[in-house]
Image (tube, coloured by chain):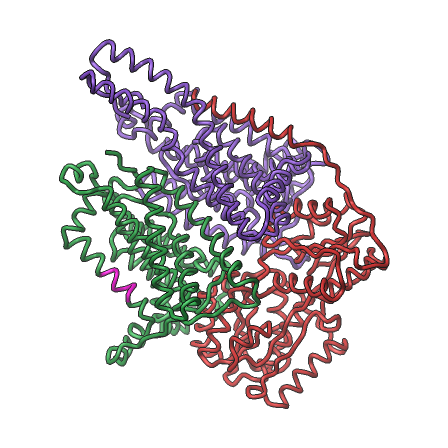
Amino acid sequence: MEFLGIFNQDFFYTAIRMAAPIILAAAGEVMLERAGIFNLGIEGGMLLGAFLAVLGSYLFQSPWMGLLLAIFGGVVLGVIFGWATISLRANQAVTGTGINILFAGLTSLLARMIWGVRDVPLTVPAFQEVPIPLLSDIPLIGPVLFRHSFLVYVSYLMVFVLAFVLYKTTWGLKIRAIGEYPKAADTMGIHVIGWKYGMSVLGNVCAAVAGVILSICFTNCFVDNIASGRGYMAVACVILGQWNPFGALAGGLIFGAGNALQMRLQIYNVPIPTSLLLVIPMVLALIMVLLVRGKASARPAALSKPYEK
Amino acid sequence: MKKRLTAMTLAAAMTLALTACGGGSTPSSQTPETGNPDGVSVAILLPGTINDAGWSAAGYNGLMQAKEDFGLAAADYSESVPLAEQESTIRDYASRGYNLIIGHGNDFQDAIESVSGEFPDTAFAITNSTVEGFDNVVGIDVKNEEQGYVAGYTLGLLTQSGKVGFVGSIEGLAQTRVENGFVEGLKASNPQAEAVVTYVGSMDDSTKAKEQANALFDEGVDCIFQYAQGAGIGVVQAAEEAGKLIVVTSPSQQEMAANTAVMYVQTDTKEQIVSAVKAYTEGNFNSDLKIEGTFASGLFKVGGFNSELMSEEIQQQVQSVVDDLTSGALNLEISAS
Amino acid sequence: MSEKTAAPPKADASASYDRLDQLVRQFEKVFNILIPVVAIVVSLLIGSIIILAQGASPLEAYAALVQGAFGGAYNLSNSLVMATPLILTGLGIALAARCGIINLGGEGQIVMGGIFATFVGTLPQLQGLPAPVYVPLCLLAAFLGGALWAAVPGYFFARHGVNFMITTMLLNDIANGIITALVQGPMKEADKFAPQSAQVAVSARLPILFSGTRLHAGFLLAVILAALAFFVLFKTPFGHDLRTLGENPTAARHAGIHVFGMQMVIVILAGGLAGMAGSAEILGSQYRLRSGFLSNYGYEALAVAMLGQKHPFGVVIAGILFGALKSGRGSMARAADLPTSFSMVLSGVIIFFVAISPILMKLPRYLALREMNRKNRQSGSLSGTV
């Protein structure tokens, strides 16, 4: 019964915090996949964003410039990824794998070229936590929900914004049409290629900003491989969440809660090898995927298929 | 059909390229130059990167210091050597005439032992290992438990809540030895205190390490020791932000947590590398050679006592444990299992 | 490609189209070989920018890369040893991709293969077995291990449509957790501290083919299996069905192909081959199980499968190329004083270019057709499309 004490305010605070970057990246990926593009390269986008955020904050001594630079990087990456997968019709999974390996190497390489070999990584100005007045004083939920960095709020807001766009606007209708029947969308006069490029940029910017959260919200420095697999988790969340922004939110929270749980189970000295406790988030996600299963029809019909006129 | 032809033509081109490049180069090993350390070239193979703020960085820094102080002809390194590429990397160094090749970690033992026979004039050293039956391979037994012991002992004296935290990276030999020493040290100074041991499961996920540290603080831990390589930066930051005492593993980490880092327990492999080079140049490099990584042999250094956080008395107590370990009055018998 | 082309109605246009088609086909043969080569050359050029920025000489660095990969029997053998698990895993991924399944689970399947092979190879009860029995037994165990790790997500995919990519990806991490726990506990070498298994029995090891090199029989096995895969894929009804299923699932269903059974077989083969890749490394090179013994090979094998154009022999060539890169990158890093992250950049760029290269392969046909269409429009006949 002592274990029930695990689920206290701190537990939920940790879960929400740790889920934020995954949720933001996953929400962007939902839009991308709804437009028919599968981006496995989120990990690479996160690493790029995390690095550029520290670089910007280092050069201009302001985290805002870091954020700006990271967004710019996300736009550029989105165009490159779009060029490869939309215009050149490259295999999307392979392109993504290439981007992941490329940016894992490149960010580490550039960090060392710029800041040299250091004992501890260089620290830069970072975003502070912003408790929301009044709301943060609500008992129980206040400290859990309303005492985060502003980008954490942005991550959760993005889910609602993107869900609104996707389901309540004509833009969303167009995006969904492109993911289901690109040919029909084209005959309806929708600029399929243009929208796909737009979603590629949006998805990669979301991934890059998720990286910003890791480097200059949660910490204040760049370390090699800072994303540590969160990009892959985001991809998993999209599928887990059945290509729905709210589903991605739920998926992200499963990872966040799973991690918060395994950290506390370690503390309580549960007689299970640590290396098995560490994969609890993945096991939870796997169980959810197998249980939820859902309708196969939720998957955009034209996902991963390059569009040819 | 088309694709088969593609493959076959490619195969032919490859074979051609291979035969063109593959002139039989025989491994050449230089004879050891005795007496003058200037002629000695040393290479170290690291499991992680040279800026991992932990194990691999210590190996790299040690070699660079040895180069500076001791005047080595060459001091080179290979970082993040994957398990599958150890043997070829070792062989590459050996065939290019490096005199002393160090595998930094017990993982390198198999590969070094299998290559060593081919290069009888090259000296090999493996940290964190005991080696028997090889004339040119020496194990450097690193007693990581001493490092953990001092950290645990110190925090045992400082804890108010009676809960002391440990954050490691990925369970491995060195990690487990530190962890076991930590638990013993804590028991020695404060038998009532509870050691709360956790691992991040990553060598570089500093964000997760930070959350892990925060989770420890949430559960009543009031002071902490980090041995989590690159990820450990997150633990240092968490401690500083939460105002919880921490024992760090380098002076530069102490700068990151100026208000809460009570001291550092550092690994400095310079002396071990120098000992190996000396033994090599003096012709004493054989199966009888014993190099230990201990306080006594200068591998671990304690410093940076923060007087605002540690009373004079506690500082003295810690210092006396370090002295006992250095003099051999205190000999830890801790297995890593 | 030619099936989609609308046949021009006029006799002379049709004849000219056929002539053109033949010409293009011949040209494509040469062109298809050139593309991967061009992709790699371009990647090396991009890499040289970074080398220059580091203040080193690209020529020197790449010379060291080639020397480290192919210079001498030992280095060459090392490249082939590195290539072996990539080829085996890549074969499985290529087969699955032919059938429309992307297997991102190579990583975990390799790990399970390694675990199973080591378990059998260190089992005290089996120590007396002669090598001709023991080695195949270990390989079989590895096949089963990898196959199991793929069959479970494969079943849920084939039966219930559960996304295969996500389940295999999650199982990669879970496999890593399991191996770490095993080498620290149940499978740890008795009376030793280090988190690793005991060495596998000598008679369970894959023999070294040439003394003085590292080349073990696993490479031979990989090549033989590639030949076998080629035979199955292109010379048997099963292979025909498999390709049909990948190219046109609807047609496959109408043709009465048992989709569920087919998908299960493919998934088991893919997992099993990856499992054998793990065992080849353990039984032929490392001899004992350690956590992370082949990390990242699963993802790289995906690139190998695609670079090899999902063709068994292409996979062998691509595997050797990637193996050579692995084998030579250390020498390159040491010669030009480059951090290891540089070789990651290089692999990443190569994979990226490999991904975008297929469209280039359609270039000759596209240009030829455009030219013909232009002429046909002038003469007023219908046009063909790519």
Decide whether residue B128 is among the magenta residues: no
Q: Main secondary structure of the magenta part?
A: helix
Residue C190: percent from the left, percent from the top?
66, 55
Q: Colour of chain A?
A: green
Q: Picture coordinates of residue B161 (x, y %)? A: 50, 83
Q: In the image shown, does C343 or C121 lie closer to the viewer?
A: C343
B331 horizontally vs A196: left or right: right
The quarter of the rendered structure image containing the N terminus of chain A is bottom left
Colour chosen for chain B: red
The quarter of the picture where residue A57 lies is bottom left
Q: Is residue A156 magenta?
A: yes
Q: Is residue A168 above or below residue C372?
A: below
Q: Which residues are magenta?
A: A154-160
Residue B236 appears at what percent x and percent y? 51, 73
Residue A133 position (above or below residue C237): below
* Residue C106 to residue A264: above or below: above
Q: Quick one: which chain is purple?
A: C
Instruction: Identify the residue shown where x is 59% and y is 89%.
Output: B311
